[in-house]
């Protein structure tokens, strides 16, 4: 019944899904640790000025802000799915699936800088995906890169994901010298404006030092236990099955829809790959979960028997609940 209730866009589903997600966020509100912010270290100035003073002093407000960001990202993913025809019908199921994928680890659910970057990242991808229907492809490229640049002012390592934006442009046949230059200008623009401000107040070197330290910092690798060694491969296998299912149905899709699905698959592979480098760890989960939430929704939608749809959705809910208790 859960699948049938949420796999539509009626008012009941839109009201119900935030409350379901909130249940998975209860433990974040009850967190009793010393620091309300996880993966905390040397932060960019924009984070220190805008976020930490408001949300970094209280467990409740940091949990509330991380929940709000998660819902904004999840509904942005849902909007991408609906706007670009990645699903056979309108649905809020991508919202729930995204929330489930980021709810297994408490450290991921708690407030940290990647939540803010992930919101700007999905908005940038959405902006680029709509460029094929626009006559102003350079403007779209500029806008998307500006979003990544603004997000990187919070999370400097977001700059490492800029090449992924170029890959998306390449998949959509948008990557030309003009669009590349436009995107590069867009990426640098927020940093140039920020550098100008720091130059005026006489602390340019401090700003550049913050960028370098953030780019080279290591947040530390997650220490896995038996539960995480079971949970993560399960999620990986489910995602792989979703990708295989997408490829099965890809020839039946419109040409532009095929390109959009290829974008999602590239996002999955590349964001997962960067997690294997020393510069990233579990904190990137809000970005990594974007692609799998789309392909899993598509896979569930294409299952021939309703019973299997319910079973698979409840299975994902079950392993997420188990992960919350065991990880």
Image (cartoon, grey):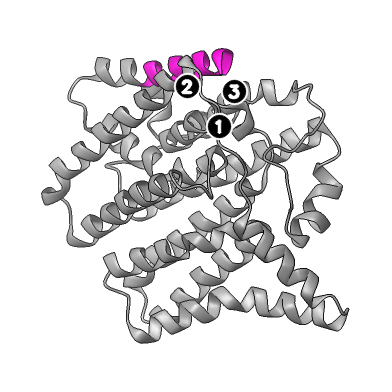
Q: 49 above or below 297?
A: below
Q: Is residue 154 left or right of residue 7?
A: right
Q: Which residues are magenta?
A: 313-327
Real-space CA distance between mark 2 and mark 3, rounded to the nearest whole angstrom? 17 Å
Q: For mark 3, give the secondary structure.
A: helix
Please name the residue shown 55% across and 28% down the image.
103
Q: Which residue is mark 2?
A: 228
Q: 242 above or below 273?
A: above
Indicate the position of residue 291 as horizontal and vertical percent values.
38, 45
Badge nearest the viewer, 1 or 3: 1
Can you name the residue that lies furthest to the bottom here?
Answer: 178
Label of residue 222 in the image: 1
Q: Are marks 2 and 1 in contact (CB under 8 Å)?
A: yes
Real-space CA distance between mark 1 and mark 3, rounded to the nearest whole angstrom? 21 Å
Please name the residue shown 77% across and 61% down the image.
45
Q: Is residue 302 left or right of residue 105?
A: left
Label of residue 24 in the image: 3
């Amino acid at each position: 019944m859960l699948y049938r209730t949420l796999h539509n866009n009626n008012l009941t589903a839109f009201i119900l899904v935030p409350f379901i997600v909130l249940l998975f966020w209860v433990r974040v509100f009850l967190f009793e640790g010393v620091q309300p912010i996880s993966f905390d270290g040397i932060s960019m100035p924009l984070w220190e000025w805008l976020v930490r003073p408001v949300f970094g002093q209280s467990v409740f407000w940091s949990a509330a802000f991380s929940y709000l960001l998660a819902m904004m990202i999840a509904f942005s993913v849902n909007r991408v799915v609906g706007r670009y025809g990645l699903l056979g019908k309108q649905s809020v199921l991508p919202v729930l699936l995204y929330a489930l994928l980021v709810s297994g680890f408490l450290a991921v659910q708690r407030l940290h800088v990647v939540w803010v970057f992930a919101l700007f990242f999905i908005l940038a991808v959405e902006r680029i995906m709509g460029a094929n229907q626009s006559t102003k492809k350079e403007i779209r490229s500029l806008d998307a890169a500006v979003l990544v640049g603004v997000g990187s002012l919070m999370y400097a390592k977001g700059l490492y994901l800029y090449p992924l934006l170029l890959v998306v442009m390449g998949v959509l046949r948008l990557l030309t010298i003009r669009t590349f230059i436009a995107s590069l200008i867009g990426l640098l623009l927020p940093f140039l404006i920020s550098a100008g401000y720091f130059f005026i107040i006489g602390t340019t070197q401090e700003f550049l030092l913050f960028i370098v330290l953030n780019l080279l910092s290591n947040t530390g690798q997650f220490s896995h236990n038996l539960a995480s060694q079971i949970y993560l491969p399960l999620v990986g296998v489910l995602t792989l099955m979703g990708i295989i299912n997408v490829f099965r149905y890809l020839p039946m899709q419109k040409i532009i829809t095929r390109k959009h699905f290829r974008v999602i698959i590239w996002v999955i592979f590349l964001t997962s790959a960067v997690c294997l480098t020393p510069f990233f760890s579990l904190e990137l989960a809000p970005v990594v979960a974007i692609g799998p939430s789309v392909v899993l929704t598509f896979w569930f939608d294409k299952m021939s028997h309703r019973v299997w749809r319910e079973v698979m959705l409840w299975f994902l809910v079950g392993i997420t609940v188990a992960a919350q208790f065991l990880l």
